[in-house]
Amino acid sequence: MRGNMKTRGISFLLALVLTVSSFWLPASGTEVVWAKEEQTQEEIQEEKQTEEGGVVTEAPSVMLMEVSTGTILFQKNAQEQRSPASITKIMTLLLIFEELEKGTLTMEEEVVTSAYAKSMGGSQVFLEEGEKQTVETMIKCIVVASGNDASVAMAEHIAGSEAEFVKRMNQRARELGMVHTNFEDCCGLTESAEHYTTAEDVALVSRELLRRFPKILEYSSIWMENITHVTRQGSKEFCLTNTNKLVRSYDGCVGLKTGSTSVAKFCVSAVAKRGDLMLLAVVMGAPDPKVRFKDAAALLDYGFGNCALYTDENKDSLKPVSVSRGAKKEAACRYKGAFHYLDTKGRNLEKVEKEILYEKNLKAPVKKGSVVGKAVYTLDGEEIGQMEIVSAENIRKAGFTDYLKKVAGKLLGMKA
């Protein structure tokens, strides 16, 4: 009896399972596909970025570049035109340093603040009309505290007006190949749709400033410093505080410039240096300042974790190159510059080899600075780059008098 009841119980359970299963099991021959939890757009984008480059950023437009070689290590929508806010000032700073290089401007020179410059809103250092500050102090006000008033005062001092200075900014942008850029002011305060650039173009102008004028890092790495306002009301101290929080929070960060407006949202061009390796991370359009700095730090972490830089300063002396038909038989030589190679494959850079190759059958005249050879660099049998070798002097073509001197020299040598 018990056996029959047990059998009937099992049969009932099996029938119940089959009945319930008929409501959700697919028909015979239908492929069973287990449902995957729907992904958010953020998760899909994160997976895509991880697959493409191994770094995840939230901001819509970013670029990571190694400064010495200009190698692009990571980019996302880097050619998308966006409002740059105060990272506009990177171009302003470049033009200031170029004037210093030309000698048309000095660090000790005094700059007078106009009523127009004083009227600038946004980030400012509260310069008064008629107030005088040195060029060096103005540079600190621009790069550390992002002073719009200081930027306009410098633009007027250099070009006579901000409008004329902006023309120079756009001309310089074209010279640098910043094809997706147009400036309408010198500080980025404008919200005009005609004031735009890209992460790629910001990287280009940032690299130009860093390579040609590394002194900028002495100023962009300042965390806090006081300046003195001297006006009709007397003198008072004003503290400049760096808007780039990475200077304090990220190991090796030494600049460069932040920016934010309601249109541009939050931007930064961040530069960090560890050993010989200098990286530049550009972030544009981040939703808030925390994301701006988080993304920049993530880009820099990725770069430092995956790159190694080989540098040959080329300070060693070179043998002179032979010159035929010249007033001199040989020309002194020099390297055109230092050689840099960026490795992203984890190779042993101690195995890099250099071979010097000179031009054969070089004939006079030879101009100073003309190419007379090259240094070829190889790693594991593969060429990784070259550096030109140039003449360090002019060698003119030998004339009749030169040949007479040579003949006389030989004759005197024979008599001796």
Image (tube, rainbow, N blue to C red):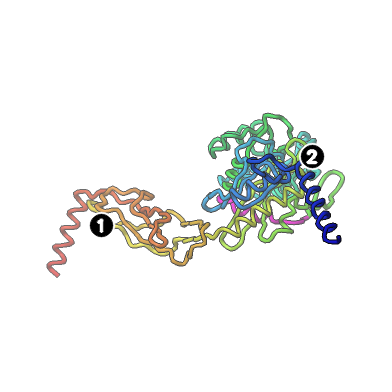
Give the residue pinned by disc 1.
Answer: 329
Q: Residue at x 57, y 44 (%)?
A: 204
Residue shown at 22% from the left, 51% from the top = 325
The magenta stretch is: 210-225
Looking at the image, do the residues carrying marks 2 and 1 touch, with CB atoms under 8 Å apart?
A: no
Q: Amino acid at mark 2?
A: Gly
Residue name at image x 33 percent, y 52 percent:
372
Q: Position of residue 108 (x, y in %)?
A: 67, 50
Residue labelled with disc 2: 122
Say what secondary structure mark 2 lies in. loop
Q: Is residue 219 magenta?
A: yes
Residue 153 percent across, percent down from the top left: 72, 39
Q: On screen, 19 above or below 82?
A: below
Mark 2 neighbour density, 10 Å: few (under 14) some (14–19) many (20 or more): some
Closer to the N terminus: mark 2 or mark 1?
Answer: 2
Would residue 291 be visible to someone looking at this image?
yes
Residue 219 shows up from this direction: no
Most foreground residue, 122 or 160: 122
In this rendering, would 209 be left or right of 293?
left
Q: Position of residue 409 (x, y in %)?
A: 18, 61
- Label 1 residue SS: loop
Which of label 2 and label 1 is nearer to you?
Answer: 2
